[in-house]
Each structure stands twice: as C-alpha cells, then as structure tokens.
Amino acid sequence: MLVLSRQKNESILIGDDVDITVIDIRGDKVRLGIKAPRDVTVHRKEVYDAIRRENQSAAALRPEDVPVINPNLSTAPLPLVKPLSVAVLVSGSGTTLQNLIDVTRAGRLKATVDLVIGSRPGLLGVERAQSAGIRNHVVDRKSSSDVSTFSAEIFKLCADAKVDLICLAGWLSLIELPARWAGRVMNIHPALLPGFGGRGMFGRKVHEAVIAHGCKMSGCTVHFVDGSYDTGPIIVQRTCPVLDHDTPEDLAKRVFEQEKIAYPEAIARYARGELKIEGRRVVAK
C-alpha cells in the first residue's frame, strides 16, 4: 500500500484522497498523473520509488506465499487475457496478410496471426507466412473433389490451431461455412459493397469497373462471411476519392491504404466483443 505525506505529519493512502493515473508508457518509462487535495504534499519521486518497491516485492512472491481467500475456489483456473488468435486465408501475394502481421507485431492490434492457409501452391502469401515463422498450409482447391471437402479441410486446420477468428485476405475460393464458425469469419473487399462485388469481382477487375462506371468515390468493405460471394453483414467501410485520370493501379493503391486501416479496426472491434449481428446489420453491443 502506498502512503503519501500530509501536512502536520498525517498520512493518507493513495485511493482515498489521492488519485494516481498512468498517462503514458514508453518502454521502461512511465508518466503518472497525480490529483490530490491542496493540503496534501505529493512527491513524485516518493510515488515512483514506492511503486518500484511494490513491483520488486510482487516479483519475489512464490505461489505458496499468496493467501487463498476462498478455499473453495483455490483450484479454479484464472481467466487469461490473451491476444485474439487469427487465421488468414490467402489466394495471392498476401499484401493484406503482411499488413496484419505488421500491425499485430508492432502492438497496434491485440491479436496474433497464428495460421496461414493458401488456396494453391506457389503463393507469395504463403511465402510471407514462412518468412515470418507462421504455421502455414496449402489446401489446393483444384485437388479437392468439391466445395464441401475443400471447406472441411480448411476449417479442420483452423479448429486444430484453436484460432478465434478467420480472416480472408485476397481469398478467391467459395467456402461452405459451418454453423460453429458463423460470425467468426471476415472478408475484406476492395470496393463499397453491395456495389462491384460477387463472383469474379476481385483485384484489378473491381477497380476497372469502378472507374468505367464513373464513380466519384470508392473504398473498401470488411464484412462477415455468409457462404456466398461478398454478401455478408457489413462491419466497416472506408472511402477514398476516384480521380479523373486514375488508372486501376492508381485507385488500387488508394483503396489499399484504407484497407490497411479498416481490417485492423474490424478485428479490434471483434476482439473487444463490440459486434453483434442483427439480420443484415452489424451493430455495436
């Protein structure tokens, strides 16, 4: 328990009249915000030294040193706060996969990419996973007898890896969604759905269609997968302008900058338990 000095040599405890708030943590440096009554003298060095002593004392504790408050619960496992475990499915170069690897490893998203599945051999996306030391498999669509067999193998790999969420990232193959995975599979599409989606609409084809249609705005959509192409409930959409002299490559670069923001945002909201599906809509809990 931390004690601060009050005038007239009296003492008060932090939490009674004094609030200590962690404002910022950078590396091993912590910045505190301290609020106290005017008649309380607060010495910041005193606070930091007390915190350090408490931490050192706690680090030295052994399990047998900690008293059991409720003997009936002494063998119950404690809840673990762990990052969301994610599987990523790829059918191409894996630029979206790389973005997810980068943001999770930089600590900007409380999740880990623990499994990558490619839809055919020789994908750069699978090579990215190998380079990053991530477990990876190829489930070749052409080698599967039907969609059901193909899908079953994918979801078995995800179940065996105990992932919490599956993210499609440039994935081009239709999959059958088992009931247990409903609401646990996301996809990102490089346009503002429901426009410019559906079978065969991916990559450059999407951007060509947007430009040919004369759209002034494009963007990206993150949605839950529902067993069809690009029709699931929408989670996040972000927009960007379509300029008069855009090529498909120009537009693709601008859209991808929005994708790099939208997908981590959708995953973070899922990890925080903020998403609820109501019919065709995803609403905040």
Image (spheres, rainbow, N blue to C red):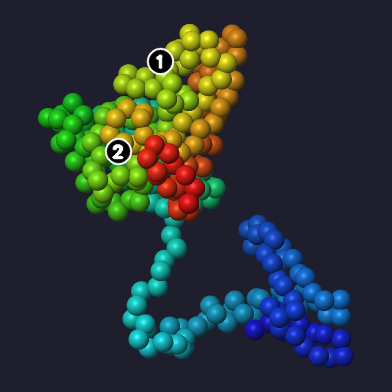
Per the image, the residue denoted by label 2 is: 117
Please give the name of the residue rendered at 42% of the width and 53% of the height, measured from the top-left corner: 84
Question: In which quarter of the view is residue 182 placed?
Answer: top left
Residue 258 in the image, given as x and y percentages of width and height: 54, 31
Please state which of residues 6 and 140 is positioned toward the viewer in this rendering: 6
Q: Looking at numbered disc 2 in the image, what kind of residue is underneath it? A: Ile
**Mark found first going from the N terminus, 2 or 1:** 2
Q: Position of residue 216 (x, y in %)?
A: 57, 16
State whether residue 89 is above or below residue 4.
Answer: above
Q: Residue at x 40, y 15 (%)?
A: 205
- 164 horizontally vs 106: left or right: left
Q: State the separation of the CA atoms marked 2 and 1.
A: 24 Å
The answer to whether any part of residue 247 appears in the image is no
Residue 205: image tag: 1
* Figure check: 105 above or below 208: below
Label 1 SS: helix
187 horizontally vs 104: left or right: left
Q: Residue at x 48, y 51 (%)?
A: 285
Residue type indicated by callout 1:
Lys
